[in-house]
Image (cartoon, grey):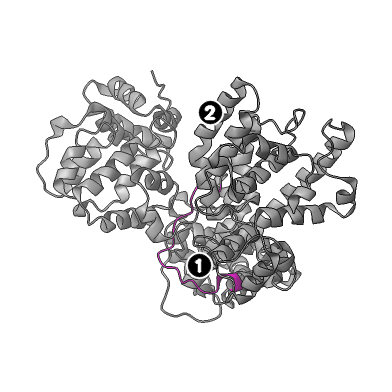
Amino acid sequence: MAETVLTNTGLDRFLELVGGAPEHRGPAFARAAEAVLGLLALRGADRGTGVPEPTPELTRQLLLEDLPAFVYVPPGELALYPAVLGALAARFDGSCVERIAAVVAETAPDFERAMHDPGNLTWHRWYASLLRTCGADLADPEDVRRRLAALDGAPLPDGARRADLMGRTALADVLLTEALTRAYVRDAEEPPPVGPLLTDHAVATGIGRVATALRDRWTAAGLAEQLAGPYAHYAPGPDAFPHLVLADALLDEHLDHHGDPAIPVPPPPAIEHGPVETDADTLLAAVEELAEEEFEPYGGEAPHLLYVVYQRGCSAESVARKAAEYEDWTVDPALEDLPVPVPDGAPGAYAVPPVPELVRLLGTPGLDEADRARLEGPARDLAAVLDRLAATGLVFRTGDAFGLTPRGAGAVRYLLGVRGVAAPDAAEAAAWPATVLVAAAGGWPAPVAARVLADRLHTRVDTAHAWTELLDALGTVHAGTSEAAATRGLFTVLDTTTAPPEALRAALRDPVLGAYALRALEERGEEADPIQVPTSARALHVLDALPAKKGPLESRRAAFDAAAAAWPGGSAALVRAMAEADRHEAERVLGPLGIALP
């Protein structure tokens, strides 16, 4: 029992002091008290009075970090842990009671969420839960062993992956071992009057054994030994997940691209969920083989190729265009995200597309046969890398087009997910609130954003309410930031021919999208009142229509002058209206033209 491992936590004294109240009796309360007092003591709570003194910081850590990492709490017993904290605080002065009560009240929703979050489960917490539903006596190691033997396989909780439980278990092991080591060192350096938390004998047997004893006490008796021995296959460790190396590489790609794992990658249009761990291992084997010298210079780019295709919403990419990027050729940014047609069939040997197709793919006029010949070698080298990936069945290359198969999309999505990258499928993205989806879609390729926004509208039967939600989000998400222009620009990817006219008419008064809505109604031949459109919306529509990067400055300035000539009050009034509506975009577009903002 853990009471013989963690000594001098004051558990017996505490239970004696609070034992008079009916709610403080029974084994469930004692179990909660043992865990709470033990964890507080491990974390360095002052034990000068004989029991650990909770502080706001330790209370918050206990509720939000330690209990969700180490302790299985049976259904109906969750409230006992805050109750123990309250009863413990009452052993001290009145201000302690108030401070702890405030922290418990503040963290209560997050505590409950953390305890039920599948992402916080360890193998030990999960199997304790599973065994209890099977009727096991969690305090009886023989019953735990017998029930574990009767399990038919090792099912997973909804919303969790084996790699998730493995990673969380490994982290919990490290955290518990570190806490035990620090506690022993702390007591050795400054021996507490009430005695040490860990005896020399307990430490001499090994900190790992102490951690195992605590883990068993806080989940199920004897469980750790079983999961480390005859039932180790029920709780695989890191060695069972070699593909996490590839997951780390994909995470690095995502961080290079977005800087934050919480920024979502777009959903593929189709995903086939095969044996994702096996598929991920297969991809890793191909990636490792490609790192060999014979696949230079692009073999080491395999993780990047997998990521960028997924980041395109799994739309096909061009071998030639990607090779041109690697060779530092100029590629029109406006064409980088355009999908590449996949031919029905093509010769196995790779050939660079004809010059007219190269011009279309790269957006670079003036290319000739000599340029095509210069690209032949790099493109063939890249095609050889892609063909090795395609041998897995998870990637395809047909002619100049390459991408992920639906099963490959499932494998890459799994790899991203196990490293915490937000990677929704199409149904999940379509179910998001409009503001969340719009915030994400602003960073996606336009064709992908168009597909996902359309999916959201179609799942809501293109109702006026669904359109209004989406249009409101386009006008408010990222407002006042440098991303506002890209966000409202999503209006242009919407198929407004399916929009109920009343939704577009209601948007006429929108200070951001009013002119966009007016143009959509006019193109449909619908009745619309332009008087309703605010000046800010008209100014933004003009600003967004100006060429911001392409073309010589003279022609770009001429476009502005033409717009200013038609604006009431002329150029000064137009610049002022643009600056007031979106100063970030106005500076970006007008600054290179030599136009100063007021």
- Name the chief secondary structure element in magenta: loop
40 relative to 421, above or below: above
* 238 versus 478 height, above or below: below
As for residue 268 lying within the magenta part, the answer is: yes
Residue under the image location 74 percent in, 30 percent down: 46
Identify the residue at image location x=54%, y=55%: 118
Please report the bounds of the magenta region as a residue range.
Answer: 261-278
Q: In this view, does 474 lie to the left or right of 148?
A: left
- Determine if residue 164 is in view: no
Q: In this view, does 264 lie to the left or right of 563?
A: right
At a point 75% along the width and 48% down the height, the residue shown is 3
Q: Where is residue 423 shown, x and y percent of the image?
A: 49, 56
Q: Disc 2 residue type?
A: Ala
Q: Nearer the viewer, residue 43 or 253?
A: 43
Farthest top residue? 598
Mark 2 neighbour class, 10 Å CA radius: few under 14, some 14 to 19, many 20 or more:
few
- The residue labelled by disc 1 is 410
| 400 is within the stretch colored magenta | no
Whether residue 343 is visible to the viewer of this picture, yes or no, is yes
Q: Examine the image and state in which quarter residue 279 appears.
A: bottom right
- Residue 38: quadrant of the picture: top right
Task: Give the side of residue 567 with respect to residue 377, left or right.
Answer: left
* Residue 184 x %, y %: 84, 41
* Position of residue 56 measured from the top left corner of the image (x, y, whole percent): 62, 29
On residue 573, the disc is none
Q: What residue type is labelled 1?
A: Gly
Position of the N terminus, as image quadrant, is: bottom right
The single residue placed furthest to the front in the displayed view is 20
Q: Mark 2 points at which residue?
A: 102
Q: Answer with left or right where residue 201 lies relative to residue 144.
A: right
Q: Given contact means CB atoms under 8 Å apart, are the residues at marks 2 and 1 in contact?
A: no
Query: Marks 2 and 1: which is nearer the front?
Result: 2
